[in-house]
Amino acid sequence: VSGSMDEAKKDIAKRFFILLYLFLQRNYEKIEVVFIRHHTSAVEVSEQDFFHSRESGGTVVSSALNLMHDIVQKRYANRDWNIYAAQASDGDNWDSDSANCGRIMQESLLPWCQYFAYIEITQGEPQNLWYEYLKVAEHYKHFAMQKIGSPADIYPVFRELFKRQPATR
């Protein structure tokens, strides 16, 4: 709910997450979905609030990543869970926070996740978070990144991010 995201970008993010949520509900019997919204601070919210709240503010992405880490440690740390995460952003983040996000991803989240998908909603050049996450993607094959420029891109990007992977031995 970053202040830098206009209503069109927020709408694209919501559409992407609705598609992901429907996919999960239809394909898996036992899932727990945790919704996190953030601007300068992050909070866990209900499905209703996630898709319908009009809250907005500045952007400190690390607040959401730290909250995710706390939730994983408190509820899912016994490793009996397969943890998948998806993040959507316009990529605009406080410059001093982007490097922190890369560190949190590498040290605190990706070791726990089976897969983490990041989508950046932009029609122009990538923002600072994209460049930081490129460094992360070089070291973690289970971290994927895609860009969405318009609503027409949502489904193709979704299919690319969540296509069936060949079995590894």
Image: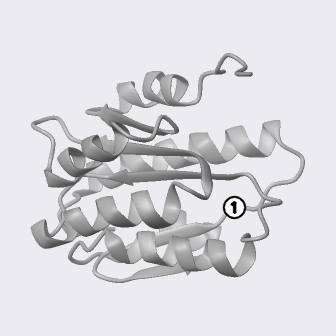
Q: Residues within 10 Å of mark 1 (few under 14, many from 20)?
A: few
Q: Residue at x 80, y 36 (%)?
A: 27
Quarter that holds the C terminus: top right
Q: Which residue is mark 1?
A: 33
Q: Amino acid at mark 1?
A: Val
10 is higher (above) or lower (below) than 149: below
Residue 73 at x, y = what percent? 65, 77
Q: Which is nearer the eye, 114 or 27?
A: 114
Q: Residue at x 37, y 26 (%)?
A: 153
Quarter that holds the N terminus: bottom left
From the viewer's perspective, tell me whether residue 163 is left or right of residue 39: right
8 is higher (above) or lower (below) than 60: above
Q: Residue furthest front?
A: 169
Image quadrant where residue 32 sits: bottom right
Can residue 110 be seen at all in this image of the molecule? yes
Residue 130 at x, y = what percent? 23, 46
